[in-house]
Image (cartoon, rainbow, N blue to C red):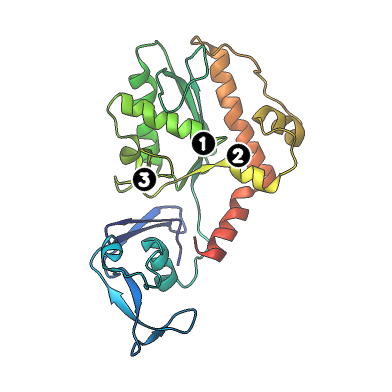
């Protein structure tokens, strides 16, 4: 089975993949039901310790927690993980569409992602299908919604990436999420291919169903654990023999150098991926472990 992302709305399972031409395929499965196991001397199943068990089906995933006992087995397994175990024999290699992004903020101090009180001055995005960088930049302080937020959201909704990546994505994505929220725009819902959202690990931060939001810095750290610094400039100097071309732009004003640095950061991420091929490496691990 080809599978890039999985999501459940109650007990309905959505799977996301692509055909040989790269077109996105979304399938809905309503034939799978949540279940767990209870000890039963006449049960047809056995626990890891040999305990005879019977399988108990419920209507919705959250019903498991109400119906389970203290002696239940497999009641803590995530519903989508249970689906993967019982319905997916093997995850096959699949064309993947990913987008590298980077944002800059119009601020004279460090912009706190949880507050996102300053306008975004520019966003650059590189698409693995077109292999082009698109950039949206601020024309005036009051035109952020029209210049950047709306067209960037429309771009993602149209392109339907499987993965969105950034260097320290917890800054970029959370700032974006809260900045759109400032304008009463549901960013993750609007870019999701099924217009649904999922709750992330962070409190009150939602992500688009059908799209994985991944920290490329975290992926890089796991394979390059001995670097003295993980600042993108340092990583570029060490591994690509190139640092940032625009080292000290002034982020407190709208200026061309900030835009050029923004594009250069994305270009550096693309170059790192071309050299180290981290995404195919992690994808192989994902498929082998069925996660």
What percent of the width, then of the height, locates residue 108? 51, 11
What percent of the width, then of the height, locates residue 63? 26, 63
Res 7 → quadrant: bottom left
Q: Earlier in the sequence, mark 2 or mark 1?
A: 1
For mark 3, what is the residue? 199
Give the number of the mark in front: 2 or 3. 3
> How many numbered dots are placed on residues in this image?
3
For mark 2, what is the residue? 217
Horizontal side of residue 214 vs 115, given as left or right: right
Give the number of the mark in front: 3 or 1. 3
The correct choice, above or below, for 63 with respect to 199 in the image is: below
What percent of the width, then of the height, locates residue 236? 70, 32
Residue at 42 percent of width and 63 percent of height: 81
Residue 126 shows in this picture: no
Res 74 → quadrant: bottom left
In depth, the one of 151 and 187 nearer the eye is: 187
Horizontal side of residue 43 vs 282, given as left or right: left
Q: State which quarter of the image contains the N terminus.
A: bottom left
Verify CB contact (< 8 Å) between mark 2 and mark 3: no
For mark 1, what is the residue? 169
Verify CB contact (< 8 Å) between mark 3 and mark 1: no
What kind of element bears circle 2?
helix
Residue at 47 percent of width and 23 percent of height: 112
Residue 263 shows in this picture: yes
In depth, the one of 159 and 179 nearer the eye is: 179
């Amino acid at each position: 089975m080809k599978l890039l992302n999985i999501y459940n709305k109650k007990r309905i399972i959505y799977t996301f993949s692509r055909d040989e031409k790269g077109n996105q395929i979304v399938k809905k499965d309503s034939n799978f039901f949540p279940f767990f196991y209870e000890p039963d001397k006449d049960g047809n199943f056995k626990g890891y310790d040999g305990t005879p068990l019977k399988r108990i089906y419920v209507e919705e995933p959250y019903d498991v927690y109400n119906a389970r006992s203290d002696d239940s087995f497999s009641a803590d397994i995530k519903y989508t993980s249970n689906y993967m175990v019982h319905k997916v024999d093997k995850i096959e290699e699949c064309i993947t569409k990913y987008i590298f992004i980077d944002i800059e903020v119009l601020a004279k101090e460090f912009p706190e992602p949880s507050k996102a009180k300053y306008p975004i001055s520019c966003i650059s995005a590189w698409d693995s299908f077109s292999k082009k960088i698109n950039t949206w930049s601020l024309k005036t302080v009051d035109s952020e919604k029209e210049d950047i937020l709306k067209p960037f959201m429309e771009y993602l909704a149209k392109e339907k990436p499987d993965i969105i990546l950034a260097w320290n994505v917890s800054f970029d994505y959370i700032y974006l999420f809260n900045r759109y929220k400032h304008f009463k725009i549901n960013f993750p819902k609007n870019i999701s291919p099924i217009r649904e959202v999922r709750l992330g690990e962070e409190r009150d931060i939602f992500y688009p169903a059908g799209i994985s939001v991944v920290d490329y810095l975290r992926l890089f750290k796991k394979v390059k654990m001995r670097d003295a610094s993980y600042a993108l400039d340092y990583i570029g100097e060490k591994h690509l023999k190139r640092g940032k071309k625009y080292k000290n732009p002034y982020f407190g004003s709208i200026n061309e150098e900030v835009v050029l640095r923004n594009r250069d950061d994305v270009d550096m991420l693309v170059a790192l991926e071309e050299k180290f091929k981290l995404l195919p490496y992690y994808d192989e691990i994902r498929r082998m472990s069925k996660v």
